[in-house]
Amino acid sequence: MRKHRLSRRRFLASTALGAGAVSILPIIGTRSARAVQGTRNRFMVVINMLGGNDGLNMVVPAHLQPYVDRRPTINLANAANLPAGKQLLDLDGNFKLHYNLPTIADIWDNNDLHIVQKVSYPSPNQSHFTSQDIFSFGVRDSATNGDGRGWLGRFADEYCSNPSEPLGVVSVGMGRRRDFEAQVTTPLILSSVPNFKVDADPDYRTDQVLRERIYQQILDGDADPTSEPGLSIFAANKQAYDLVDQVQSETADWVAPDPGYPNTTLGRNLATVSQLLAGRDTFQTKVFYTGYGGFDTHSNQHVNAANDGRHASLMKQLDDAVGIFRADMQGRNMWNDCVIVVISEFGRRIFQNGSDGTDHGHGNPFLVMGGRVKGESSAGGMTGELVEADIDTESTVPFEHDFRDLYGNVLQQHLGVNPTPLFPDPDYTAAFNDIDLV
């Protein structure tokens, strides 16, 4: 009998530590979810461009002379700075999109893209880590405000705690960011569906099938522990095994679109989002959070006939992945249920540096896309439009729209939830309805 207790103790420890992509904390809470009727199938996809995207070379103010003058070799308004055969993509006769964003330009033309410029937060910080934490926690100063939870952790606790919605918030390919810190629930963290499994013991990989069978017998046959921490650990492991089985079975019938997703970081991540949406009737995921890095472009943004530059390749990755995802969602009749929000922790300086790059800045354009998004004809398509005075003498693009206003508008108008509990910053004045996005 003592031997059985020892093996069980070792089982609890080994599975808790070796659950791979499966969270070992309770994924399903006990509170009742408060989703609004009529929004059941709607979802939001956040794409984070990690490193601080150069928004001035994504949504290009080609008509503003300071942009041209202060970026002599990296501005995209001069044809000499563009690769041969490339040209900017017109938005409204003034602003233009980067030449590697043709699909996103088409989304604009189809009235499904809204651009919000000058997005940041009060007293912006130019540190990657500080700014990313502010975006993650949803408060300007997490040391004195907030409750230790991320904004998506609060969302999961508030609106996704119903056991019928086990995957209310999912992180795809982003690891355990602070956005997902919660109290009642734990948003699901995974890299891909095939890799979402209980890890094999590295010392006994050939015994994995037998090992899992024995674990399952213990989970199914043994009485639950009566005290902590055994009770929570045992429940978490049982839930982990059940969830692995559920994710694999619910996504088994997923078929990749033709053409398939690009073999890039963002392409693979959005393919995983699509796979999980195959089980959306069961999972009821409200928010998918993903992204890709490389945007800290302090050098080599220079473009010319022979060099496409670092930033251009990042724009192409965004356009290729979003393009397939949109076609995929349209083919599955999900485009009207989807809103994509493309963010970055800050923008870049208005002027170029000595290395043909740009340093850390403040305000930045964010993209909001989807079948229900109010685009060009229905809402002007652009909010917080840059003017010459914004970039004439300042070093950084000014802050006008709080990123929480964008999140809040989509959460309220698209998902039908009250965003106020998600951003408990006493210095933040919510303006969810000031931006007409959805």
Image (spheres, rainbow, N blue to C red):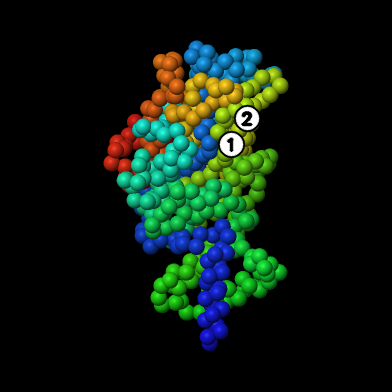
Position of 33 compared to 354: left or right?
left
Residue extending farthest bottom: 1
Callout 2 environment at 10 Å: few (<14), some (14 to 19), or many (20+)? some
x%, y% of residue 401? Answer: 38, 30
Q: Secondary structure at mark 1?
A: loop
The residue closer to the viewer here, 142 or 41, is 142
Residue at 39% x, 28% y: name it: 399
* Mark pair 1, 2: CA separation: 8 Å
Position of 180 compared to 174: left or right?
left
Q: Is residue 77 above or below residue 335?
A: above
Residue at 60% x, 61% y: name it: 197
x%, y% of residue 393? Answer: 43, 16
Residue at 56% x, 57% y: name it: 21
Q: Is residue 171 visible?
A: yes
Q: Secondary structure at mark 2?
A: helix
Determine the image quadrant of residue 82.
Answer: top right
Q: Are marks 1 and 2 in contact (CB under 8 Å)?
A: yes
Number of marks drawn: 2
Residue extending farthest front: 354
Q: Is residue 433 above or below residue 307?
A: below
Q: Which residue is mark 2?
A: 310
Determine the image quadrant of residue 130.
Answer: top left
Callout 1 environment at 10 Å: few (<14), some (14 to 19), or many (20+)? some
x%, y% of residue 110? Answer: 53, 28
Q: Tag 2 or tag 1, which sits nearer the N-term?
A: 1
Q: Is residue 369 visible?
A: no
* Tag 1: amino acid: Gly
Residue at 40% x, 75% y: name it: 227
The residue closer to the viewer here, 78 or 140, is 140
Q: Which residue is mark 1?
A: 294
* Tag 2: amino acid: Arg
